Amino acid sequence: MAQKEVCYTLFYFFPAISAPSAVKTNNLMNDYLKKYSETIHLDEINKVREERALWLSKKGARPYIEAVDKLPEFKSEKVDFSGDVITVGNRGELTEDQFDDLHAATKTLLPWRKGPFQLFEHFIDSEWKSNLKWDRVQPHLIDLKGKVVADIGCNNGYYMFRMAHHHPELVVGFDPMPRFQCAFDLVNRFAGFNNLKFELLGAEHVHLFRNLFDTVLCMGVLYHNRNPIQILSGIWESMKPGGQLIIEAQGIPGEGSYALFPEDRYAKARNVWFVPTVECLSNWIKRVGFKDVECFSIEKTTSEEQRKTEYAPWESLDDFLDPNDRSKTVEGYPAPVRICIKARKFMN
């Protein structure tokens, strides 16, 4: 049942929560990845899983876990992932106390970067209107029905839930942030989708899922990595021959193949390493072996798509750009654009 699936997920990833050893053993025996063990490196994946599970036993993750654990577990009568807003639950399915606990949990999990969500008629207005990015990407996706998909840098799972509407066999979300896993678990404990799996792993671990994925989405990730070529190579290894890659990345305008390497910060972010032009990003993808590389969208980042909200109350795009010249960041670099590229893995 869906309720047990959610419960087992929490026990596996949250070792600080007491659980009978039989439950843990049963969960490992029923690992959803076992059916793919002939191609993937399951032993190595499990080693990383065990290491990452320790992160969740640390004090910083405890408020997130406790907030989600306080909520009831059941599959809601209303689940709709077909539109812009991820919608789960009718208001009458929760008591007043349970609704208050839900509201408190969503606040504990601030900030909500991706969305929007509506949970039991409670609206979560995220920093990014992620539906706008999805509208750019979705028409270029291959048919996801029955496919195995990776969402690298999945955050709270917004795009995983959008993909669930297309009936994939499996969607694996990769993100090393405990808060994001808890946000995903909060939504899915009521949605009950057993084919959506969150792994507390980073982009650097994707190569361990060798020859598994028909489609890989890597959105908002590459520029946060010191070695984007290594990440792209790992993605190539993780994909089946003929598989499709969708890359969405922050970039800069310009002709030619080059990338900005910020001296310290880019748009106030320390964790931005390489910000490429379209041609540079395309060449990275080609150099690791992908074919049919095509840029299908270049969009200027605007405050319509990224902004402060009640659920993301800290700095956002308007704070990152020069107030006197919005074509530049506060550091004086070219303001970001969002680049979308699709490619295929064809064997030579």
Image: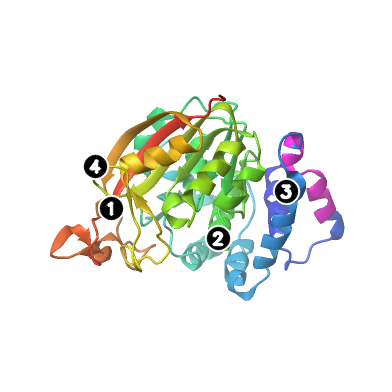
The answer to whether one can see residue 84 in this image is no
Quadrant of the image occupied by residue 191: top right
The residue sitting at the left extreme is: 324
User: What's the amino acid at mark 3?
Assistant: Lys
Note whether 298 is above or below 200 in the view shown: above
Q: Quadrant of the C terminus?
A: top right
C-alpha distance separating marks 1 and 2: 24 Å
Q: Secondary structure at mark 2?
A: loop
User: What's the amino acid at mark 2?
Assistant: Met
Q: Earlier in the sequence, mark 3 or mark 1?
A: 3
Point out the frontmost of discs 4 and 2: 4
Q: Residues within 10 Å of mark 3 (few under 14, many from 20)?
A: few
Residue at numbered disc 4: 255
Residue at numbered disc 3: 4
The answer to whether one can see residue 106 in this image is yes
Q: Earlier in the sequence, mark 1 or mark 4?
A: 4
User: What's the amino acid at mark 4?
Assistant: Glu
* Badge 3 vs badge 2, beta-carbon distance below 8 Å: no
* Badge 4 vs badge 2, beta-carbon distance below 8 Å: no
Q: Secondary structure at mark 3?
A: helix
Q: Residues within 10 Å of mark 2 (few under 14, many from 20)?
A: many
User: What's the amino acid at mark 1?
Assistant: Pro
Tell me if 314 is positioned left or right of 60 in this view. Answer: left
Q: Which residues are magenta?
A: 24-36
Residue at numbered disc 1: 336
C-alpha distance separating marks 3 and 1: 43 Å
Q: Earlier in the sequence, mark 3 or mark 2?
A: 3
